[in-house]
Image (tube, rainbow, N blue to C red):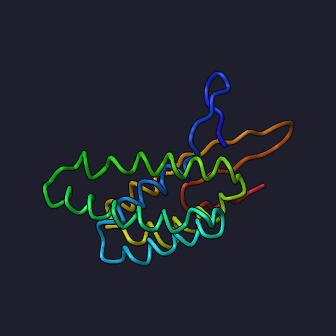
């Protein structure tokens, strides 16, 4: 988990992206696959809550579609914040979840989005800490390192 100023906790970028992509995927034709993958994640981590999450996602999709049809972008995007919080809590309680959450994002949620929304989700926040004689190489895309 990232630590913000004064030791406060900030939400991991994967959680932010996943919450945004989850709500964006609700308005797509491939929502059922994205929903199933999301509920499967809950079944593995918190099996007792999976059925409730499944029902909540279906109800929320109805609201998102109605907001989109009405042209109400604020109402359409409001659930993203709630899902970021929910995913943050899941992630906080299960710190090893990063790999599974990234896989859900990469394999199910982001591909369900239109190209312009995919670009927003793929915005990367990176941070690094190096000590002593360490070298750090970071890239948001391809990286080619040559020379000595």
Q: Quadrant of residue 98?
A: bottom right
The location of residue 31, given as percent across then percent down, is 37, 73
Q: Quadrant of residue 104?
A: bottom right
Residue at image coords 69%, 54%: 94
Horizontal side of 21 relative to 41 (left or right) equals: left
Residue at image coords 43%, 78%: 33
Residue at image coords 46%, 57%: 122
Residue at image coords 29%, 66%: 27
Horizontal side of 137 relative to 115 (left or right) equals: right
Q: Is residue 103 above or below residue 97?
A: below
The location of residue 39, given as percent across then percent down, is 52, 69
Q: Nearer the viewer, residue 113 or 57?
A: 57
Quadrant of the image for the C terminus?
bottom right
The location of residue 56, given as percent across then percent down, is 41, 61
Horizontal side of 20 relative to 5 (left or right) equals: left
Q: Is residue 6 above or below residue 12?
A: above
Toward the right, the furthest residue is 132
Quadrant of the image for the N terminus?
top right
Toward the left, the furthest residue is 70
The location of residue 61, given as percent across then percent down, is 32, 64
């Amino acid at each position: 988990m990232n630590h913000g100023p004064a030791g406060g906790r900030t939400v991991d970028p994967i959680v932010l992206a996943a919450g945004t992509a989850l709500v964006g995927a609700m308005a797509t034709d491939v929502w059922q696959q994205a929903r199933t993958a999301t509920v499967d994640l809950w079944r593995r981590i918190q099996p007792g809550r999976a059925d409730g999450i499944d029902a909540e996602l279906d109800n929320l999709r109805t609201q998102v579609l109605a907001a989109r049809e009405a042209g109400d972008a604020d109402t359409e995007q409001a659930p993203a914040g709630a899902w970021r919080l929910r995913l943050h809590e899941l992630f906080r309680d299960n710190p090893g979840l990063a790999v599974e959450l990234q896989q859900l994002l990469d394999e199910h949620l982001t591909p369900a989005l239109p190209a312009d929304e995919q670009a927003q989700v793929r915005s990367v926040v990176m941070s690094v800490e190096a000590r002593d004689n360490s070298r750090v190489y970071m890239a948001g895309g391809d990286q080619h390192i040559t020379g000595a």
